[in-house]
Image (tube, helix red, strand yellow):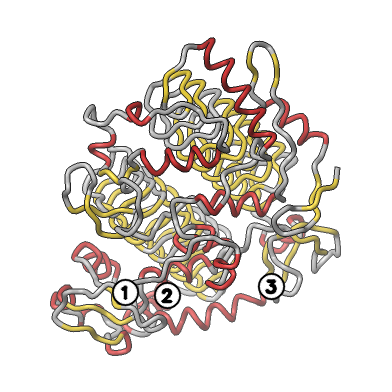
Amino acid sequence: MQKICKNCQQNFEITNEDLKFYEKVSPEFNGKKYLIPVPQFCPRCREQRRWARRNQAKLYKRKCDFSGEDIISLYSPDKSYKVYAEKYLWSDKFDPMTYGRDYDFSKTFFQQFYELQKDVPRGAMQQDGTNENCEYTTFGGNNKNCYLTYACSYNQDICHSTFVITTKNSCDCLVVIGSEFCYECVDCSKCYNCKFCKDCNECLDSYFLDDCKGCVNCICCKNLRNKSFYIYNKKVSKEEFEKFKKYLDEGDLLKEKEKFDQWKFQFPYICQHIVNSENSDGDYLEHAKNCHQCFDIVLSAEDCKYCQYSGWNGKDMMDVSMCGKNSELVYEMQATVESYNCAFTFFCRDDQNSYYCDNINHCKHCFGCINLRHKEYCILNKQYTKEEYEILVPKIINKMKEDLEFGELFPITLSPFAYNETLAQEYFPLSKKEILEKDYQWKDEIIEVLKVEKIIPASKLPNDIKNISDDILNWAIQCEITGKPFKIIKPELDFYRKMNLPIPRRHQDQRHKDRMALRNPRKLWERNCMKCNEKIQTTYAPERKEMIYCEKCYLESVY
């Protein structure tokens, strides 16, 4: 079945397998299925819509609406939402059922949900109470001593990092797992004491590596496997290696990085990063089976489609972002774990048979609810009996179908955040003009006035960390790209000294943007292998200058 996207007007396909999935995940009441209709938006526009509800890294100072204390929050002070510090939201002092209301059939469901969203208090930072000394951490749990880290879990002593798991003593990383003492690493796992590495696994004591596995004491290398003491892919003596390493430590690391970034184009790149997977396509897939158009799927996933940052024993999932840990039969979800047979929900955990909800935990049979815990048979935060619930929800669904709402996620116009505050702006960037023309929200950035002794231009910083005194903790640095001032905190300075790294010249937001630019878009192009000419799918667009090989040719060139 061919459809035209209601949003971007592009053609997209609905397969017979898709139709079977929609039927499986459709709700059932009194033995009757209420079929979820086929989507009106194409897969990419559906993904954009999900990310447009997730502010992950724009933080503000405001008052807690429960206690009046100063807090850090994802919600700026000018937003009309009620915002509580997590310790109150998770306590017995907060009862979300007091905000329950009757369903009004004279209004649309989306309108009523938006009104409820305005009334029910929201968590300031999307934390679950398992963090220690992580005031500036969002969407993370079981972290200790982390600063400005986002969507990170089970970490210790991490700064300025995103999507990092089970990692210690690292800074400025993106998608790093099980590593320690890493700096400016992207898509790396099980690495130790590595700097400026990309797509590396089990590497130690190395700088500037790209797609290297099992390498120790290597600098400026690409596509190496199980090598030691290599520089620019050439074997060197230990003495030569130490001499070059000393030269880098005392010189300009970033200048060498520029040289390496140009040098590595002479080597091939693999078309897709897919490991131990079967009948799957996308990029960065590990232990995947029957997963299509999926990206960043790790630790086992089966029968998934159009998913991002998901997996962890997930099964039968479609159009899901940030979902995992034993979830099954979930559709159009953003950030959920251990859920079963749920759709159109956000930030939910261990839920079953629930639809169109936001921030519910350990709930069953809920529809249109916000911030509920351990509840069952609720609609718009109001309690019903099982019999009442199974009579009323079908009526609501039928009305939603009349209003063309059922089967579609909440529109971007009803997001709690401005578009440019969310990850949608990161993955689907729009200009201010485009955002306003679509009636999305826009928020002008206000550059905070830092209370510091002085602001110094990045160009004035010495390259050698040994020439940096503790006085820098009382100063701000002016970003060499954006001009925005930023501060260095003590644990961060200690890390740079231990790792013998220069002080960053760029604001942390710009550094994250630079790391994101190292990752390809989540989109597949049809191309030909540049060696054997076989047809391949890849996230490298045809106009890019990298030399792209199919997996067979790539492995032959590496081993």
* Residue 331 falls left or right of residue 446: right
For the point 42% across and 36% down, the residue is: 359
Kind of residue at disc 2: Phe
Looking at the rendered structure, the secondary structure element under dot 3 is: loop
Looking at the rendered structure, the secondary structure element under dot 2 is: helix
**Label 3 CA crowd tier, 10 Å (few <14, some 14–19, many 20+):** some
Considering only vertical position in the picture, is 145 above or below 193?
above
Report, in whole angstroms, how far the alpha carbon at label 2 lies from the one at label 3.
Answer: 28 Å
Q: Earlier in the sequence, mark 1 or mark 3?
A: 1
Report, in whole angstroms, how far the alpha carbon at label 1 lies from the one at label 3.
Answer: 38 Å
**Position in image of residue 365 (x %, y %):** 51, 21
Residue carrying label 3? 546
**Label 2 CA crowd tier, 10 Å (few <14, some 14–19, many 20+):** some
**Label 1 CA crowd tier, 10 Å (few <14, some 14–19, many 20+):** few
Kind of residue at disc 1: Ile
- Give the number of the mark in front: 1 or 2: 1
Q: Viewer-proximal residue, 448 or 368?
A: 368
Residue carrying label 2? 241
Looking at the rendered structure, the secondary structure element under dot 1 is: loop
For the point 43% across and 54% down, the residue is: 55
For the point 62% across and 23% down, the residue is: 395
- Give the number of the mark in front: 2 or 3: 3
**Position in image of residue 237 (x %, y %):** 45, 74
Residue carrying label 1? 447
Q: Viewer-proximal residue, 433 or 42?
A: 433
Q: Earlier in the sequence, mark 1 or mark 2?
A: 2
* Residue 347 falls left or right of residue 167: right
* Residue 539 falls left or right of residue 479: right
Direction front: furthest residue: 106
Kind of residue at disc 3: Glu
For the point 60% across and 75% down, the residue is: 264
| Marks 1 & 3, CB-CB < 8 Å contact | no
